[in-house]
Amino acid sequence: MKEFTFTITDPQGIHARPAGLLVKEAKKYAATLTILKGTKKGDLKKIFTVMGLGVKQGETVTVQAQGADEDAAAAAMEAFLKENF
């Protein structure tokens, strides 16, 4: 399993439009992708899960990737977050 943490810098946090793009990016990979914020966690491939976390600016999320292409999936998710949040 691969894992990384990321602190959201976008003033609006993870809001609808970029969350949709994040989910779309996650769906490109076969690995199971999980996003965690505090005690909440969910499937990174489901928009309602990502939006339900209510991630705001300055909060830290953890992304876990597990499966056949976990290395590529984790690297892509980290790069996507750095570019968009």
Image (cartoon, grey):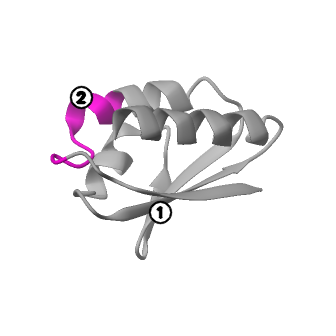
Query: Along the horizontal axis of the image, is 41 left or right of 69?
Result: left
Element at badge 1? strand
Q: Residue at x 37, y 49 (%)?
A: 49
Picture layout, residue 3 above or below residue 83:
below
- Whole-angstrom CA distance, mark 2 to mark 1, is 19 Å
Q: Residues within 10 Å of mark 1 (few under 14, many from 20)?
A: some
Q: Give residue 19's quadrant in the image.
A: top left
The residue type indicated by label 2 comes to Arg
Q: Residue furthest right?
A: 68
Relative vertical location of residue 55 with respect to residue 75 in this rendering, above or below: below
Q: Residue at x 39, y 64 (%)?
A: 60
Rendered position, 40 above or below 74: below
* Sooner in the amino-acid sequence: mark 2 or mark 1: 2
Residue that numbered label 2 is attached to = 17
Q: Looking at the figure, which quarter contains the N terminus?
A: bottom right
User: What's the residue type where badge 1 is placed?
Assistant: Leu
**Label 1, on which residue?**
36
Q: Position of residue 33 (x, y in %)?
A: 60, 46
Seen at 42% across and 32% down, the residue is 83
Whether residue 15 is in magenta: the answer is yes
Q: Is residue 44 left or right of residue 52?
A: right
| Depth order, front residue of 15/7 | 7
* Residue 10 percent across, percent down from the top left: 24, 45
The tally of labels here is 2
Q: The C terminus lies in which quarter of the figure? A: top left
17 displayed left or right of 29? left
Residue 41 in the magenta stretch? The answer is no
Q: Which residues are magenta?
A: 11-20
The residue positioned 71% from the left and 39% from the top of the image is 31
Q: Quadrant of residue 78?
A: top right
Q: Secondary structure at mark 2?
A: helix
